[in-house]
Amino acid sequence: MNIIQQLSVFLENKAGRVSELTKILGQAGINLSAFTIAESSDFGMMRVVVSEPQRAKDLLKEHGFAVSLTDVVCLQTPNTPGSLNKALAILSENGVGIAYMYAFAEGDHARVILSPDNLNDCVRVLLDNKQRLIDADEIYSF
Amino acid sequence: MSRDEMRALQGKRLRETVERVYANTPFYRKKMQEMGIMPEDIQTVDDIVKLPFTVKTDLRDQYPFGLFASPMSEIVRMHASSGTTGKPVVAGYTRKDLGIWSEVLARTFSAGGCDSRDIFHIAFGYGLFTGGLGAHSGAERIGASVIPISSGNTEKQIQLMTDFGSTVLCCTPSYALYLAESIHKKGLQDKLKLRVGFFGAEPWTEEMRHEIEEKLRLKAFDIYGLTEIIGPGVSYNCSCQNGMHINEDHFLPEIVDPETLQPVAPGQVGELVFTTITKEGMPLLRYRTKDLTRLVYEPCECGRTNVRMEKIMGRSDDMLIIRGVNVFPTQIESVLLEFAEAAPHYHLYVDRVNNTDTFEVHVEMRPEFFSDNMSRMLDLKKRISARIQSVLGISAEVKLVEPNSIPRSEGKARRVTDKRNVYANK
């Protein structure tokens, strides 16, 4: 299972909205593995990888959030110069575009969440080229 | 009747009315004298612009009988509108006025395809309110059988409606929906014989019309009126249901800009103004209804040549002037209804920064249309802005906000925050 379900949450630009979200998920015992916030002038979009995506989605919906699930992949590269570039070169050589990505490095590894324009191609070319993808089960339990 | 014939008739009746109020109503005589207008200055319909306007507060100030143009001995009926603040608005009718009233309502009911074989279930309130007795007189005038049940007591309404086989329902649209739900709860919808309904006395939407038509299995017609002018029957739907035909041989309509009070260009939206040109008891000159609509002079498919008014689009009290452009919140609503991604819930923020008006439209997004795709969301904003620009002729900063974040309010929603202190001195 190389495909990861990411929560995308619409965030109005107002104080306390993110903490409201983290409070709801925290109280429900749902863990956040990674997230990023993109912003435009008046609204933001929070993208989150959580331990139980479907339950998190239902819960946030109940609390009035506009939320959807998006399929993404998680690439793991060595935490060394040039490693990310190698993976990205594979994708661009194979014509896979990326809408957005966010990453985090610690110790020996770096992990990169990718939202490609073609999910299946992305997974295929990365695996064919011996890149390591993190399984859903693995990342949900980080 | 051709437009020229109608205008000639209206001109003649307008002259007679002006003479009548000048002679009998001190309020109008004084106003006309202050403006330097004499009855003979009014010769044709076009001269109407010389006449003074009448507003609701004039009626309150003249409470109770100051605008009557007939002696009490000739007044045979009085009605009054409830009036949420202060004194009620009183209307007096002579015998001739009651005849006009039943005639315009007879036209209304005939236009809806009703005749003497129909059984009219009149669930408008009877009493000071014009709805009940007004509809009653029109239904009698066409020779229908009338059930004057008045409003309230839904159980009894449903019992008589099914037992008597009512074919026509007259009431407010909201009560029609309430009745429909009660009937469906009892599973009595198959016992109904209703085929036509006339609904009015409050604003209602096309969606409500469809819901009423579907649930009560009838054809729903709009009926417009106001106590000040005569009550229900000022204008009515024909079978085309495309605008309301105004009984303009009795009630002469104009559309004016609510700010400048000048007539708008033909077909433009503005405030509806009526002059009664046949009434004796309480004729009114250029009464400002505060209702916003536009007039359509093209002949209707039904063959009637009298002018039509569109469904009321809002109230002029709600009008905003932003960068010199008249903006009605309902126009924003109609734009949003074109976008499936947006809910028809919005809030307008107007402010003045560096002597320029800022205009923000906060729009609620429908949760099911939310997507991870940021550019699609930004595109939605852009498309709504462009549509507002083309409909209103003014640019707006559209902000998407979370579902259910705009407060819902019962009745008149407060949808505008105007932070400019331009009216501070008024």
Image (tube, coloured by chain):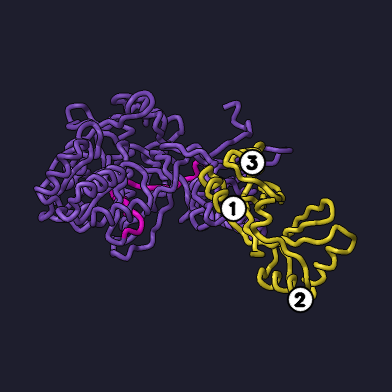
Chain colours: A yellow, B purple
Decide which of tag 2 and tag 3 comes sooner along the chain. Answer: 3
Q: CA distance from mark 2 to mark 3?
A: 38 Å
Residue B365: x, y in percent? Answer: 55, 51
Pointer 3: residues within 10 angstroms few (<14), some, or many (20+)? some
| Left or right for A106, reference B88 | right
What crowding class fits label 1: few (fewer than 14 Cα within 10 Å), some (14-19), or many (20 or more)? many
Instruction: Kindly identify which chain the residue marked by label 3 belongs to.
Output: A
Q: Nearer the viewer, mark 1 or mark 2?
A: 1
What residue is shown with label 2? A94
What amino acid is at disc 2? Asn
Is A17 rendered above or below residue B264? above
Q: CA distance from mark 3 to mark 1?
A: 14 Å
SS for dot 1: helix
**Picture residue at 47% right of the left edge, 39% below the top:** B408
Question: In the image, what residue type sits under mark 3?
Answer: Thr
Q: Is residue B220 visible?
A: yes
Residue B121 rendering spot, x and y as whole percentages: 16, 46
- On the image, the x and y values in percent for residue B154 come to 20, 39
Q: Nearer the viewer, residue B329 or A19?
A: A19
Query: Is label 1 on the same chain as label 2?
Result: yes
